Image (cartoon, rainbow, N blue to C red):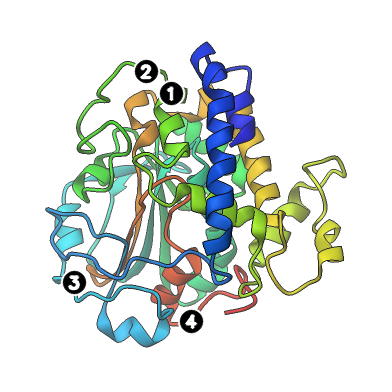
């Protein structure tokens, strides 16, 4: 949050409210700290099967219940509803430029509908999912990550996050998000509705960074600083190792060893997020979609088996995306140890 609010590209209004925003963050952190669960933020327990109303959080087929964490909401989805909603919706392959259907009714596929290519959620999601790709492909699961934006933004995103171009697709108009009725973000009533004001992208995102129209974001931010002894996210050391230069924040994962091993150490996740924030801000104009109304649009995750959704998670806000290992578990029947070595 802090680099975003202090970056020189931010306009004068953002600079004026910076101190207020940071005060709110500090107050929220103190409020969240006593109630933070060492097991991380809980998932919503209920969702609806109709696309007329967005699910609150997670949906999985009942037969997957034993394979997923007890906190996941359970739902018997109506067969094919997501695939039907995506009928006729097309996305473009980053590697080949081919236009392909967003969903199909054959095989098993993990569909990650990312937010725009300059969003923290997209970067963090891709950094995790890329590590599980070999396991997924070995088990015959196709992986498709669809981001909001154009071809050049998608290519830059792939380069910065290390996500394979051949598995990445772009959707310039957020047609997938509209078809699946994903959360439109602050200041919009639907994915197809224009932004309700002419504010700059920074001002559109600022309320969401403070939790407005983005429930759970502040909790996720604070979580990154406190650590979590119940998880051991292997993807974080892998990301830190790949970017290490010795100069903060590009530090080696061994820097955190003094705090112990085998769990998410305090400030470890926050350091990765700071790296991502710097990378995003340095290429902000090249990463955001041409239609800047879409910088607040949210995404979601589907796992389809022969066209039937066996898992669905609708993002609530910034950093409140599907637990990637949970989606992988729905696709494989087992978690990926490349993402987390403690499951």
| Residue 199's disc number | 2
Q: Tell me if label 1 and label 2 are in contact, CB under 8 Å.
A: yes
Residue 10 seen: no
Is disc 1 placed on a helix, strand or loop?
A: helix
Using the numbered discs, state the Cα–Cα distance from disc 1 to disc 4 in whole angstroms.
Answer: 41 Å
Q: Nearer the viewer, mark 1 or mark 3?
A: 1
Tell me the quarter of the picture where residue 337 sits: bottom right
Check the image and name the residue furthest to the top.
12
| Residue 77's disc number | 3
Image quadrant holding the N terminus, namely: top right
Q: Which residue is painted at 49% across and 46% down in the image?
A: 122
Is disc 4 placed on a helix, strand or loop?
A: loop
Give the class, few, some or many, for how many residues have Cα within 10 Å of label 1's Cα (few <14, many ≥20). some
Q: Nearer the viewer, residue 72 or 104?
A: 72
Residue 250, given in percent of the width and then of the height, sits at: 78, 44
Earlier sequence position, callout 1 versus callout 3: 3
Residue 65, given in percent of the width and then of the height, sits at: 34, 83
Earlier sequence position, callout 1 versus callout 4: 1
Is disc 2 placed on a helix, strand or loop?
A: loop
- Residue wearing tag 1: 203
- Residue wearing tag 4: 334
């Amino acid at each position: 949050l802090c680099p975003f609010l202090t970056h020189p590209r931010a306009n004068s209004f953002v600079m004026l409210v910076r101190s207020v925003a940071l005060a709110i963050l500090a107050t929220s952190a103190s409020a969240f700290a006593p109630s933070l669960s060492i097991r991380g933020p809980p998932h919503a327990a209920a969702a609806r099967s109709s696309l007329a109303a967005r699910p609150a959080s997670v949906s999985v087929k009942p037969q997957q219940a034993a394979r997923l964490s007890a906190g996941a909401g359970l739902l018997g989805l109506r067969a094919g509803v997501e695939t039907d909603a995506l009928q006729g919706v097309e996305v473009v392959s980053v590697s080949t430029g081919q236009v392909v259907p967003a969903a199909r009714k054959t095989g098993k596929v993990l569909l990650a509908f990312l937010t725009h290519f300059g969003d923290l959620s997209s970067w963090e999601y891709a950094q995790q999912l890329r590590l599980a790709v070999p396991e997924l492909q070995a088990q015959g699961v196709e992986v498709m990550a669809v981001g909001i934006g154009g071809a050049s933004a998608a290519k830059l995103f792939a380069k910065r996050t290390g996500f394979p171009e051949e598995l990445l697709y772009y959707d310039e108009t957020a047609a997938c998000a509209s078809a699946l009725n994903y959360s439109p973000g602050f200041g919009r009533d639907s994915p197809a509705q224009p932004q309700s004001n002419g504010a700059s992208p920074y001002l559109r995102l600022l309320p969401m960074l403070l939790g407005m129209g983005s429930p759970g974001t502040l909790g996720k931010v604070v979580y990154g600083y406190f650590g979590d002894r119940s998880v051991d996210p292997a993807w974080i050391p892998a990301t830190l190792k790949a970017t290490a230069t010795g100069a903060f924040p590009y530090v080696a994962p061994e820097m955190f060893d003094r705090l112990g091993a085998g769990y998410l150490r305090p400030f470890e996740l926050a350091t990765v997020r700071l790296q991502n924030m710097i990378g995003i801000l340095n290429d902000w104009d090249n990463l955001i979609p041409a239609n800047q109304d879409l910088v607040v649009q949210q995404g979601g995750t589907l796992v389809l088996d022969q066209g039937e959704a066996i898992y669905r998670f609708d993002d609530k806000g910034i950093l409140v995306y599907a637990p990637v290992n949970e989606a992988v578990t729905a696709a494989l029947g087992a978690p990926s140890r490349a993402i987390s070595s403690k499951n």
